[in-house]
Amino acid sequence: MKKIVYFRSKCIGCSVCALQAPNIWQMDKTDGKAQLLDAEFKKDNYFRMLWPDELETMKQIEQTCPTRAIQLL
Ligand code: SF4
């Protein structure tokens, strides 16, 4: 199973991820950056398991994020 890795420090708050997959991403009202829901925080980055039915949407988001803050491993 793949994982989403989110490098939050790279986020510029464009909202693309939250608009495309609001069940996975939400915008943080305090600093305007994206929040990866149900994520685990390790070594300054966020990790979350990627379910098979989320894969295609997350591939598009990975390609669309302007700062490459999101990677699928
Ligand atoms: S698409 Fe990338 S830069 Fe835009 S809000 Fe999401 S993580 Fe941040």
Image: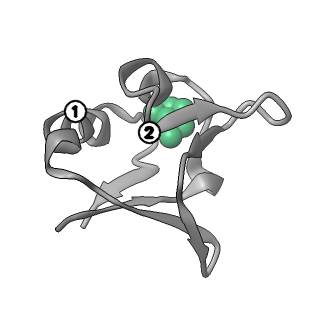
Residue 67: assigned label: none
Q: 10 above or below 60? A: below
Q: How many marks?
A: 2
The residue lying at 54 percent from left, 47 percent from top is 37
15 and 12: which is toward the camera: 15
49 and 57: which is toward the camera: 49
The residue lying at 17 percent from left, 44 percent from top is 55
Q: 6 above or below 26? A: below
Cα gap from disc 1 to disc 2, whole angstroms = 10 Å
What is the three-letter code of the residue carrying label 2?
Answer: Ile
48 and 68: which is toward the camera: 48
Return the residue at label 2. 24
Question: Where's residue 63, x and y in %?
Answer: 25, 38
The quadrant in which residue 35 appears is top right
Q: Residues within 10 Å of mark 1 (few under 14, many from 20)?
A: few
Return the residue at label 1. 57
The answer to whether mark 1 and mark 2 are in CB contact below 8 A is yes
SS at badge 1: helix
> Disc 1 or disc 2, which is closer to the eye?
2
